[in-house]
């Protein structure tokens, strides 16, 4: 979806801990020109301006990115996943998976306590997972991450067994996300549904404690002084360096950037492409840009209706859009154009697809001629049997339009007009939009789908994953190969096997011209050069356990 | 005799207020029914991964599967008992959600109102009936403030006073300094309208015979304006101020968003985009209540300002 950073954005994480701050001194000592040493300093308060505010703070309920990314500081997971898809110990010191991929046994660390003083143990895992699948919780996302969940058994106080009704390979990844993090069972018992309101009621085991929340303004996290169970991949063990971490909710781009420039915040999320070039180390500011994994921003062609039932027309559209030029002119080079529906930041990305379907308006015109769209009407649009070649591509409701997708859309519209294709862009309210989309009534839809796993291709191309069922298959196509490969990819833990299937899926989807990949969505942050040691995980969310403030 | 008269008038007022509130709730309810789309889907957003089971669960919990008339009666029943229901999205009682966010908005609205009145009074008294150039310049400025979108004004003020000179913090409601820029942003367009109207009123009054009489007794120009003309010019000003004050809630939506302030504004935005029915109706009721209270205040102020209205009836 266009608004990936806001809505459902299932993020099953493969963590790519990148030391973003390398550029500003923590790792390489190369940046900023400051003489501050590379030795982290404890203390200080960091303010981070983000562009959205959680609706619900309850990690078991919320489907929002922003909830997961803030609460990551407060809630730890069983396992940690690095950028190569490898899992590391975290709250679980070791684990084993049964051959049929139905039972996962975790041996837990024995020294972990929640910030309310109660111990973290097998019972806590059970309490949390059972709460997520309880229909009364009305989980919008976490329950989906648990998939075919059967139950959780407490084997002994520090051994827990999670079972599924069928093979469930994605579970380790799911378990690494904050949505399957752990509340103190005491807090669950005491606050229950009030956990969604945020604040001190949200008790976890993380490096930070959720101290206070002022709706519409800020959330304040403070250091958990007892923290000593960071994943081994972190730069340091022990408590976080920062005393205080404040999230400020500033939805206006210009206000966020202004606050960063004037030093009122030290880090700002979602820096607009127009501002990227002005944030230079010379200005005391630097840009942290990181490609999001999962589905890139794709134009999804609905092959089940109208002119798009003819593959030649779909291919004409795919080859008739000048993706390079459009993306460059709209985003000033801040985003890389895409060649696959899958982001290069995802395991299983097929880099051999680069350059395989370049802009070719002559070929596009030829394909349209072959498809019988040879006539022209008075406005210059192609016709066939007296009917104009016209495609419907609704504009997202205003509040969901992001990243200037409306402007990029105008460029696409202009490209296709040159070929004699009319693209209508009616502006719709959310209700109408959803009804049309779910019903497969549009020709084109556009969205990205952040998820640190190639399994996102199943959501895009498996015939069972229609938008109405929570999937993202706006192509409404039923292709036996795509169905088979996306399902097989899901039932294996072997990286080579998975890569084989997902490479085939990417190629097949492009061969069938089901999507026009446009650009690779990136998270762009601005930060003061005084800030060191910030890392971004695979979801491109910033992590603050290693962060510290220099001079 | 006089007491019962007063009591009856008060009762009439209260009854009218209740009718207005009920009407507002009904209209809001009807409007939300007319907006296309399934409320649960709208609430979750177009690309929610929530399963059909979860959707059904949410629908059942809020009684959204029931016929509309039953939902309406059900809702009305709760409303009459003073229960505003629970927000779909935030899963908290609407009453407490609003109560939590009310103080910062009231603070913002009152400061803006005070600033607007003060500025309007100053410019109108200073420019009414004076030199053409001064008057023209002031008029132009007023027109500019009225026609600039408030988020734009807000960003300009922020750019100058917060980002550049760093006199005020960008956001929040932590102390008085954080209130200055948002209050000014909200006040400026009001100031423009009020100053225009007040100046007109003053100028009309200054041409009345009593103004000439007063001046002939040796009063200075400004004194005539303040002591005599101002009272006459005040009546339309009061009406307009009442109306503008009612609309402050709407203005707060933008200002609070730009400045990252807590308050009702953010709540309104969130409630309407997510079709959070109980919250929307709760907020509609709040704004209806504000208007009812304000119009009562305006009526009372009329009595204070214009002695001629006090003679027979208590309320119009």
Image: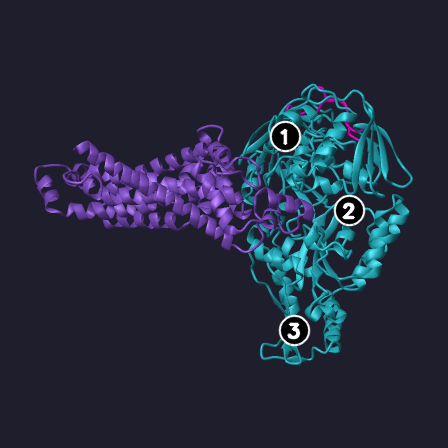
Q: Point out the frontmost of discs 3 and 2.
A: 3
Q: Check if mark 1's residue and mark 2's residue have beta carbons within 8 Å.
A: no
Q: Give A34 or A43, whichever is nearer the viewer.
A: A43
Q: Which chain is cyan?
A: A
Q: Is residue A482 left or right of residue B305?
A: right
Element at badge 3?
Answer: loop
Q: CA distance from mark 3 to mark 2?
A: 37 Å
* Residue at x 44% of width, y 35% of height: B82
User: What is the quadrant of residue A114 in the picture?
Assistant: top right
Q: CA distance from mark 1 to mark 2?
A: 37 Å
Q: Which label's residue is closer to the chain start, 3 or 2?
A: 2
Q: Is residue A287 left or right of residue B306?
A: right
Q: Which residue is mark 1?
A: A192
Q: Which label's residue is closer to the chain start, 3 or 1?
A: 1
Tell me, what hue is chain B?
Answer: purple
Q: Check if mark 3's residue and mark 2's residue have beta carbons within 8 Å.
A: no
Relative to A376, say whether A504 is above or below. above
Q: Which label's residue is closer to the chain start, 1 or 2?
A: 1
> Is residue B149 shown to the viewer in this render?
no
Q: Which residue is mark 2?
A: A345
Marker disc for residue A389: 3
Letter of the chain that mark 1 sits on in the rendering = A
Q: Are marks 1 and 2 on the same chain?
A: yes
> Is residue A154 shown to the viewer in this render?
yes
Residue A373 in percent (x, y) is at 69, 77
Relative to A1, say whether A197 is above or below. above
Please provide the residue range marked out in magenta: A226-244
Q: Give A25 or A191, whichever is nearer the viewer.
A: A191
Residue A72 in percent (x, y) is at 69, 33
Q: Give B242 or A196, whichever is nearer the viewer.
A: A196
* Residue at x 79% of width, y 32% of height: A152
In the image, residue A236 lies in the stretch drawn in magenta: yes
């Amino acid at each position: 979806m266009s608004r990936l950073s806001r809505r459902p954005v299932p993020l099953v994480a493969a963590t790519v801990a990148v030391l973003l701050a390398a550029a500003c001194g923590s790792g390489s000592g190369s940046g900023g020109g400051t003489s501050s040493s590379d030795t982290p300093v404890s203390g200080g308060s960091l303010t981070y301006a983000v562009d959205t505010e959680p609706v619900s703070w309850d990690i078991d309920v919320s489907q929002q990115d922003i909830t997961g990314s803030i609460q990551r500081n407060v809630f730890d997971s069983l396992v940690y996943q690095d950028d190569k898809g490898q899992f590391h110990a975290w709250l679980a010191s070791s684990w084993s998976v049964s051959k049929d991929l139905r039972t996962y046994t975790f041996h837990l660390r024995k020294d972990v306590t929640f910030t309310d003083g109660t111990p973290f143990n097998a019972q806590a895992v059970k309490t949390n997972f059972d709460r997520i699948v309880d229909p009364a919780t009305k989980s919008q996302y976490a329950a989906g991450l648990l998939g075919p969940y059967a139950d959780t058994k407490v084997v002994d106080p520090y051994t827990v067994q999670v079972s599924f009704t069928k093979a469930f390979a994605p579970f380790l990844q799911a378990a690494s996300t904050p949505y399957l993090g752990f509340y103190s069972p005491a807090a669950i018992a005491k606050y229950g549904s009030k956990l969604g309101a945020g604040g001190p009621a949200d008790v976890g085991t993380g490096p930070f404690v959720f101290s206070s929340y002022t709706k519409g303004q800020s959330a304040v996290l403070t250091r958990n002084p007892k923290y000593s169970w960071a994943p081994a991949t972190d730069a340091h063990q022990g408590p976080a360096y920062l005393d205080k971490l404040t999230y400020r909710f500033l939805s206006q781009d210009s206000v966020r950037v202004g606050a960063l420039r004037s030093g009122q915040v030290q880090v700002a999320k979602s820096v607009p492409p127009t501002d990227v070039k002005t944030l230079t180390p010379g200005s005391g500011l630097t840009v942290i840009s990181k490609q999001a994994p999962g589905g890139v921003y794709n134009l999804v062609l609905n092959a089940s209706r109208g002119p798009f039932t003819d593959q030649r027309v779909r291919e004409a559209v795919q080859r008739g859009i000048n993706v390079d030029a459009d993306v460059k002119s709209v985003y000033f080079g801040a985003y890389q154009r895409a060649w696959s529906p899958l982001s290069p930041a995802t395991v299983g990305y097929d880099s051999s697809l680069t350059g395989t379907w370049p802009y070719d308006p002559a070929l596009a015109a030829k394909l349209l001629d072959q498809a019988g769209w040879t006539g022209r009407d008075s406005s210059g649009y192609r016709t066939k049997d007296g009917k104009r070649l016209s495609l419907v591509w609704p504009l997202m409701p205003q509040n969901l339009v992001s990243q200037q997708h409306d402007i990029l859309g105008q460029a696409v519209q202009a490209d296709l007009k040159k070929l004699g294709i009319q693209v209508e862009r009616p502006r719709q309210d959310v209700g109408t939009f959803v009804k049309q989309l779910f019903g497969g009534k549009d020709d084109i839809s556009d969205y990205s789908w952040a998820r640190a796993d190639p399994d996102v291709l199943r959501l895009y191309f498996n015939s069972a994953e229609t938008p109405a069922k929570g999937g993202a298959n706006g192509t409404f196509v039923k292709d036996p190969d795509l169905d088979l490969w996306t399902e097989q990819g899901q039932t294996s833990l072997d990286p080579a096997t998975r890569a084989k299937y997902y490479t085939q899926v990417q190629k097949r989807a492009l061969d069938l011209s089901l999507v026009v990949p446009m650009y690779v969505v990136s998270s762009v942050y601005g930060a003061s050069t005084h800030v060191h040691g910030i890392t971004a995980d695979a979801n491109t969310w910033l992590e603050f356990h290693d962060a510290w403030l220099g001079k | 005799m006089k007491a019962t008269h007063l009591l009856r008038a008060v009762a009439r007022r209260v009854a009218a207020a209740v009718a207005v509130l009920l009407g507002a709730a009904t209209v809001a309810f009807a409007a939300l029914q007319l907006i296309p789309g399934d409320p649960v889907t709208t609430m979750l957003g177009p690309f929610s991964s929530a399963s059909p089971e979860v959707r059904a669960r949410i629908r059942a919990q809020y009684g959204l599967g029931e016929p509309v008339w039953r939902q309406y009666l059900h809702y009305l029943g709760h409303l009459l008992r003073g229960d505003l229901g629970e927000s779909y999205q935030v899963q908290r009682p609407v009453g407490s959600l609003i109560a939590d966010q009310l103080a910062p908005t009231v603070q913002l609205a009152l400061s803006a109102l005070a600033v607007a009145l003060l500025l309007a009074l100053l410019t109108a008294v200073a420019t009414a009936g004076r030199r053409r150039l001064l008057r023209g310049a002031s008029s132009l400025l007023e027109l500019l403030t009225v026609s600039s979108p408030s988020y734009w004004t807000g960003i300009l003020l922020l750019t100058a006073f917060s980002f550049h000179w760093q006199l005020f913090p960008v956001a929040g409601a932590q102390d008085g300094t954080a209130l200055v820029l948002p209050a000014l942003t909200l006040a400026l367009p009001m100031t423009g309208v009020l100053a225009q109207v007040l100046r007109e009123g003053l100028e009309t009054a200054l041409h009345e015979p009593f103004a000439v009489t007063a001046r002939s007794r040796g009063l200075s120009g400004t004194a005539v304006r303040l002591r005599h003309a101002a009272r006459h010019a005040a009546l339309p000003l009061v009406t307009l101020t009442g109306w503008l004050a009612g609309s402050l809630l709407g203005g707060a939506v933008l200002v609070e968003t730009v400045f990252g302030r807590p308050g009702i504004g953010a709540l309104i935005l969130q409630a309407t985009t997510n079709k959070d029915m109980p919250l929307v109706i709760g907020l509609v009721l709040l704004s209806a209540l504000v208007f009812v209270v304000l119009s009562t205040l305006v009526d009372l102020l009329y009595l204070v300002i214009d002695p001629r209205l006090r003679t027979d009836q208590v309320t119009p």
